[in-house]
Image: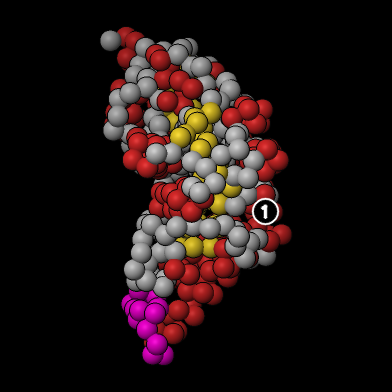
Amino acid sequence: MIYLDYASTTPVNQEVLKAYTYVLEKYYANTDSLHDAGLKVAELMEQSREQTASCLKVKANELMFTSGASEANNTAIKGSAFALQHRGKHLITSCVEHSSVDQTMKQLQELFGFEVTYLPVNSSGVVEAETLRQALRKDTILVSIMALNNEVGSINDIAELAKVTHESSRAVFHSDCTQILGKQPLTFLPDIELASFSAHKIYGLKGSGLLYHKQNVRLVPLICGGQQEAGLRGGTSNAPCNIAWAKTMRIAFDAVTEAEIDEKMDEYSRHVSELNQRLRLGLAEIDGVEINSPQDATPYILNFSVKGMTSEVMLNALNHYGICVSSRSTCSSKTKAPSKVLMAMGISEERATHSLRISLSHLSKKSEVDELLNVLKEIFNDYRIK
């Protein structure tokens, strides 16, 4: 099998898995129990929170453990919207967000009377600062813009967008950082109030996420019923998953100190950039292929379309050869509608229904990229002959 679908999920690092299993078997007490066993598990969980916060360069009490980025997105958006609705009910997001953001906004609009503005993106798939500035109003209370697009790899200038937001309104700024974590430094975190993360995108456990929230940000809890997570998320803590976060962060970068993390991230990026360029050059040799990802997108994601072959046909053909790729966000994989991201970029409906997403990792190899290109050429040639 050749796995080139890392934007969907990553394999669990074996050290993370061993640590998780060990904690699951040995430290099974409830973190809110007052006996020694419970206190020990609570201590380990807080140590993980502190170490994870150190990797992200934030404060430990600004991190909330969640079941994943979708819950973190829901908590950030609904929690702040409900808490700030006395100041206004206008929300802003983009038209290319992950479904957990898009559907949350729609629910707030349809069921709770909020007004949502969906910002367009330019041909590179990013939100322009001036577009956001013109949409901001006195009653705008929240802006939510993803850092890195999960379908085409476009990178938003979150620091600039947050600056515009804070200069022109009293709104808080949230960013879905699920795809950017581990791919480049999160230098913009001090500029925003809320950010969402997921462990399974960086070789960690599924069902494990984080919400970064600045201390001064008010949130209405979505899950009531306990004192856990400073009263913001009731329910017995998933201690094994939460404790595994610190190891996940360290192992993802094969580093411990902040300097080592940045250095390792650069090393991974250089390797993936070489693979991305190799893939772009190879695709350019195939008649009918059009690349949809902008040149300045993250090298970890490459989206392209093939004239005359739908996404479904290409996916099935590649799967026959044991090659795993996607056509869009996995959370929207079962719909046959054209990609809303590509359509928003001004790409034709035909190209949008004939697209594939290749997502790479530092684990990816040149031989895998070469095999993908060879198989694609064979598939296209056979299809056209038929």
Q: Residue furthest bottom?
A: 36
Which quarter of the picture shows residue 22?
A: bottom left
Where residue 203 appears, as percent x and y from the top left, is 46, 55
Which quarter of the picture shows residue 16?
A: bottom left
Q: Residue at x 47, y 74 (%)?
A: 45
**Could you tell me which quadrant the C terminus lies in?**
top left
Q: Residue at x 39, y 14 (%)?
A: 350
Q: How is the image coloured?
A: secondary structure
Q: Does the magenta segment cover residue 32? A: yes
Q: Is 235 situated above or below 153? A: below
Q: Residue furthest top?
A: 385
Q: Does the magenta segment cover residue 124? A: no
Q: Residue at x 30, y 25 (%)?
A: 336
State the residue position of label 1.
Answer: 190
Q: Residue at x 49, y 22 (%)?
A: 344
Where residue 87 appears, as percent x and y from the top left, is 54, 46
Q: Amino acid at mark 1?
A: Pro
For mark 1, does the 10 Å Cα neighbourhood hold few (<14), some (14 to 19), or many (20 or more) residues?
few
User: Which of the two residues, 309 or 186, is positioned nearer the viewer here?
Assistant: 186
Q: Which residues are magenta?
A: 20-36
